Amino acid sequence: MSPEHMRQLTDIYFTEIQPVYKFLELALESGDIPDSMTSVLLGIAALACLFSNQHTDLESEIIQNARSSLEYTTTLESPTVDHIVAWLLRVIFLRFNSSPNAAWIASCTLMHMIETVNLHLDPQLGDLDETTDSLYSPRLKRQIYCTAHIFHTWISYEYGKPRVIPHEASHAAPLEGWTTVDRVVWRLSDALDPTQHVDSTELENMLLQVAELQPSHPAVQLKRCNIALCIYRRLRVAGRSISKEVIDQILHIVDDGLTHATAMAKKKLPWWHILNVPFQAVCVLLAIDTKESLRRVEESFRTLNLIACEYGTRAIDKTWNSACSLLAIQSRRKREDLDVLSRVENVFATAGYTATDSSLTGRVGEGFASEMLWDLEQILSTNICGL
């Protein structure tokens, strides 16, 4: 690979990925490159290849060599921060382009290696000797650790796997180099641990924080939507009645997510949330089960269909089939409910009554019936029994 080609791939990386995950500051210079930095450069190049419109044999070699260059690092007695960065790039690559289990195993390896070099300890708190890897500033090390932590956390959450938590980790979210959105995502990532109880009030506060975020990058917009859908699922599990305001927030965030997923799918970008968000939207919209939510199911399926047509992978086909199955089950339940109500209608029809018979509506009160005709939610919320 020529230096010019490497620079092209690096430009792609810093254009597409660095704005979303900020943990690299590299200057390419001529001269000898240490083996550990070779792994980093290959990781950058492999990710950039995913965003390249033209896949060549050379790019396949780059991807294979990026994987091979890391195989020996787990046996090193003293790995470096370069090796950690290379493993983080590998985790991101697998998140884009491989099975959930492969991404989770790689992320576990990454966290173990972080603990080996004490990268989970904040040097500004005096926890870490700064005599090694001086090319990485304390700020950059903090960003590397926090990015690795977030990736491992969400991969574990989404696939129901346990997390590797380094002993006595002392890093906080970076104040420099990270946006407000980045810091909120960092904070919520730990708070949403499925093994920890979070009460409904706090979950609604979390959702409000997510709703107020205004990320500039489309991929972060999808991340925002995914977190909101996760919070909604936690609220449902909590068993508390969910307010209309919360539902409206979810629906608005879903609208934004579907818009960005559609736009990114048309560009055939490889971000994993492009598939994840519309599928999760289908699940949540069907669960909310209101007119407003069900109207959005069609748009979710349009987005999923576009993704299936643009990408055509086995994983996407499986997701499409799962979404269709969920829709079929919900439709069958709706038809079964309609059959029950139709049988009730038949009982009254047999008795000579019709739905507009004044002998029925008149018993409730003519004014009441005319003002609230068949608005079930309003009827249920009105005290008509005098209690």
Image (tube, rainbow, N blue to C red):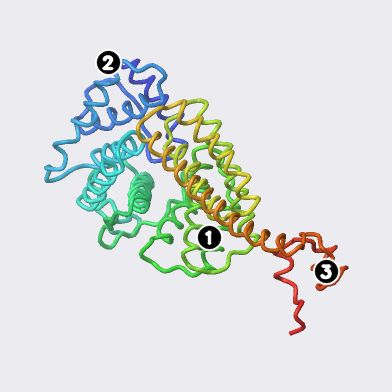
- Three-letter amino acid code at disc 3? Ser
Q: Work out whether residue 105 or residue 181 is closer to the camera in this orientation and state it.
A: 105
User: Which residue is at 48% across, 48% downward?
Assistant: 226
Can you identify the residue that label 1 sits on?
206
Q: Earlier in the sequence, mark 3 or mark 2?
A: 2
- Disc 1 packing (10 Å; few <14; some 14–19; many ≥20): some
Kindly report which numbered mark, 1 or 3, lies closer to the viewer in this rendering: 3
- Label 3 to label 2: alpha-carbon separation: 80 Å
State left or right for residue 265 relative to residue 366: left
- Three-letter amino acid code at disc 2? Asp
Across and down, in percent, residue 247 comes to: 61, 57
Residue 192 lies, with reference to residue 144, above or below; the image says: below
- Disc 2 packing (10 Å; few <14; some 14–19; many ≥20): few
SS for callout 1? helix
Across and down, in percent, residue 113 comes to: 21, 48
Q: Work out whether residue 309 or residue 183 is closer to the camera in this orientation and state it.
A: 309
Across and down, in percent, residue 369 comes to: 82, 66
Across and down, in percent, residue 59 comes to: 30, 20
User: Which residue is at 35% across, 18% downward?
Assistant: 55
Can you identify the residue that label 3 sits on?
359
Which image quarter holds the N terminus? top left
User: Which residue is at 27% across, 27% downward?
Assistant: 42
Can you identify the residue that label 2 sits on?
57
Residue 143 lies, with reference to residue 383, above or below; the image says: above
- Three-letter amino acid code at disc 1? Met
State left or right for residue 272 relative to residue 58: right
State yes or no: discs 1 and 3 in contact (Cβ < 8 Å): no
- Label 2 to label 1: alpha-carbon separation: 46 Å
- Label 1 to label 3: alpha-carbon separation: 50 Å
Residue 297 occupies quadrant:
top right
